[in-house]
Image (spheres, coloured by chain):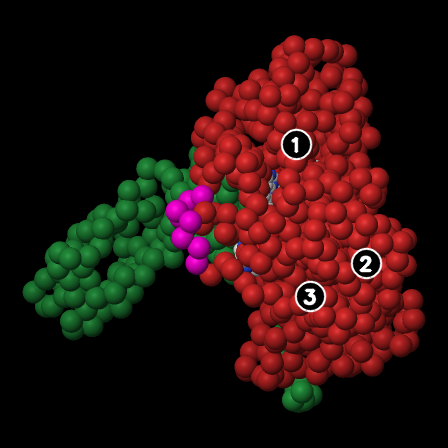
Chain colours: A red, B green
Amino acid sequence: MARMTGAQMVLECLQREGVEVIFGYPGGVVLPLYDTLPQYPGIRHILVRHEQGAAHMADGYARASGRMGVCLGTSGPGATNLVTGICTAWMDSVPVFALTGNVSRALLGKDGFQEADITGITHSITKHNYLVMRPEEIPLTIREAAHICRTGRPGPVLVDIPKDVFQESAEFDWPERVHLRGYRPTYEGHAGMIRRAAELIDQARRPIIIAGHGVIWSDAQEELVALAEKAEIPVITTFLGIGAFPEAHRLSYGWLGMHGMFYANMAADNADLVIGVGMRFDDRAMGRFKDFNPGVKIIHIDIDPAEIGKNFPTAVPIVGSAKNVLPRLTEHVREAKHPEWLQWIDQVREEHPSLHIRESRRMLPQYVVRTLYEETEGNATIVTGVGQHQMWAGQHYFYKRPRQLISSGGLGTMGFELPGAIGAQVALPEAEVWAICGDGGFQMTMQELAVVVDENLPLKIAIFNNGYLGMVRQWQQLFYDRNFVAVAMTQPDFCKIADAYGIRAIRVETKAEVAPAIREARAYPGPILLDFMIDQEENVWPMVPAGAALSETIEAPAEELAR
Amino acid sequence: MNPSTNGYHPRKRANHHTVVAIVEDKPGVLMRVASLFRRRGFNIESLTVGHSEMPGLSRMTIVVDGDSAPVEQVEKQLYKLIDVIKVSDLSNEDIVARELAMIKVRCNNVNRHELLDIASVFRADVVDIATNSIILQVVGDEDKIDGLIKMCEPYGIRELSRTGRIAMVRGTKTTTVHEPEPERIARIHQTQGRRVEGDLPFSSD
Ligand SMILES: Cc1cc2nc3c(=O)[nH]c(=O)nc-3n(C[C@H](O)[C@H](O)[C@H](O)COP(=O)(O)OP(=O)(O)OC[C@H]3O[C@@H](n4cnc5c(N)ncnc54)[C@H](O)[C@@H]3O)c2cc1C
Ligand SMILES: Cc1ncc(C[n+]2csc(CCOP(=O)(O)OP(=O)(O)O)c2C)c(N)n1
Ligand SMILES: [Mg+2]
């Protein structure tokens, strides 16, 4: 054992936990930690421009790599600025480790300068959080927090450390393992339940798998493919499950939900058995719960027991990780064929293709995404903001692998795009990462362009510039009788903004320029911003109107197709 | 409000469930549990917490309104809290459930004897007596306490304080936890998050 300051212990522990990058922003109470950073050259600190960006970067880093992402902020405003990012990670089960400083212990609870009760504030948006009152508690606390963060159902944790705890010294006692009586995630899956599930699958005539984000966290794509192939079960995914199953596979039928494919929604609604894997039956995916496929039986495989039965009654619950449960299920199911059922879905798909892009002289956003897909041969990692462009990016790019689409689903956080993509690019320095940005969302976090430059990241940034908060405009058009209020925006010259940061930029004004611009961006070794002046009034289709059932999915109306 | 009843209406208890949670005795646990119930919209009828037979662990008895949420969800959500170690739903158990109440009742020399008679029927103790008021302490299940309250109402209730329910399963079955922690870890868990006593360095940043 050696004597160390609290600050040294924090960095020593993070290093032992395998942390290589911290996205952070300094301030008074974390100065002792910053002062110590140079002693740990193995930990790279990336200076963000707003703490929200730090949390989203840690999140993007985690989603892209499967590893824990770490962000750091000072007390008070630094900590509260992290909150949106922590909540974003919470809703989508992302392992983000947030570290905050707080005022010295003598001032805690006295409304000291820049004191915020960040543990209290984040109770409901972290898996767990800690306020550390003694340096000797740091090693076990960081170990426990990291363990909770990345095991079981992943999720954010927060560790809050008062300034004088960073400064005080104590013996460093590294615990070999953690021991948490109140935290024992189940990975295995109950053998009896797995057998019952296999029986239901064997009996089903119209089974369907709905694969979610949990399959991606579980790295279970192969295992999923094996099950689907053996029993010939068509697979659809949730929006966050995109990439959990290769979209080019013959059993892939896209994704379901509010803006999912028509045939995916119909397949889910007409199946006699739904096998939900690592997905939480969210309302955006399932439509109006009470009218979802009456009579369907549900098998639910999820690592979090509290998800089972939360929104739908479940015939067979299996608590465990997809990685472990799927192969055992595959073992038990009989080989099967479902030609009639597949034909039925194929027929719906033929009649309602959903992903057909109409001929148009306009620069349709769908066309931009599809061209990007073609130019990148479907290999790029795509990070999006929230809104119409997000849905088009999910629809018109076809994904092969897990972690290829990174997007804020549950919280739907505008502004995620740029910092999320920065985090992903930091995690995957060799990968081709595209940030698909809304012109609205981009302006919420665009100051992080400075990080792209500082870190010399070869990020490709595509702005879908429709001059609108497009998704909201779409709702006002459809549900508020075209009463457009507070959705049109005068946009700055995004190319000049990029230029001001020293980033190359190209404005793309016509359809003919789309492919050449993408090619140029790809050929360029550094960061580059493309400002796509897309058609302003295009809507996202298909759509399950707010509050409707999947069976009520509507498709693009004729007058829109004629535009 | 009906003045004769002090506005007190015993609630119907048709669908009340008694849940016992063994939790870490750490700062913030109560807030975590309360905040979970609030956020998920589970209605708490009562919540009592105190030390248990296990050092470092507290026992919480929570009475939830089953109409607000299926007890199964309440249990599962509680389990998600890291500081919650074991949850037992006692709804289908043969239990002894008790609550303590103190009732300060208006009285005078004329009617004090009536009140004392009522108290003895309910086996309530008189724990304080003054010229114009009396404090009754009663232990029992909610029905018994409600009954006594009802009888006191005509005299005028000045103050009423109830502890909420605690419960135990009859027989040998318990809600205890048999899992000691390694000594080194237990030592840190004991202080984790707790204030440090004594003089601390002052610094304004
Ligand atoms: C504008 C907008 C439109 C949207 N439209 C749609 C839409 O049309 N369709 C749609 O689906 N979504 C849509 N969403 C996203 C939606 O809000 C949800 O975020 C999404 O449906 C959740 O997907 P999920 O359940 O797969 O993932 P999560 O919410 O991340 O849930 C993951 C689940 O997997 C479990 N899990 C984690 N690890 C494991 C493991 N190892 N093994 C097993 N299980 C595990 C978790 O416990 C959890 O239950 C939209 C979002 C926005 C912002
Ligand atoms: C932080 C935040 N504020 C508000 C919203 C509500 N909202 C959802 S989509 C959207 C419009 C997004 O506009 P833009 O980024 O331009 O994307 P577009 O829909 O035009 O593609 C808004 C305001 C949100 N999701 N996040
Ligand atoms: Mg827009």
Residue A319 visible in the shown view: no
Q: Chain of mark 1?
A: A
- Residue drawn at the location 75% of the way across and 31% of the way down: A247
Q: Is residue A326 left or right of residue B159?
A: right
Residue position marked by numbered label 1 in the rendering:
A356
Which comes sooner in the sequence, label 3 or label 1? 1
Location of residue A109 in the rendering, given as x and y in whole percent from the top left corner:
56, 78
Q: Please, which chain is the residue tagged with disc 2 on?
A: A
- Is A338 included in the stretch rendered in magenta? no
Name the kind of residue labelled 2 in the image: Leu
Disc 3 to disc 1, C-alpha distance: 30 Å
Residue A405: x and y, percent?
73, 45
* Residue at the image position 72 percent from the left and 55 percent from the top: A508
Q: Magenta region: which residues?
A: A478-485
Secondary element type, mark 1: loop
**Image quadrant occupied by the N terminus of chain A:** bottom right
Task: Confirm if mark 2 falls within 8 A of ligand 2.
Answer: no
Q: Could you tell me which residue is drawn at 66 percent across and 47 percent down? A: A363
Q: Which residue is mark 3?
A: A494
How many labels, in total?
3
Pointers 1 and 2 in contact (CB under 8 A)?
no
Q: Secondary structure at mark 2?
A: loop
Quadrant for residue A25, please give it. bottom right
Tell me which numbered mark, 1 or 2, is placed earlier along the sequence. 1
Q: Secondary structure at mark 3?
A: helix
Residue A241 found in image quarter: top right
A426 shown above or below A500: above
Q: Residues within 10 Å of mark 3 (few under 14, many from 20)?
A: many
Front-most of A227 and A472? A472
What residue sits right under mark 2 in the picture?
A: A459
Residue A105: x percent and y percent? Answer: 65, 80
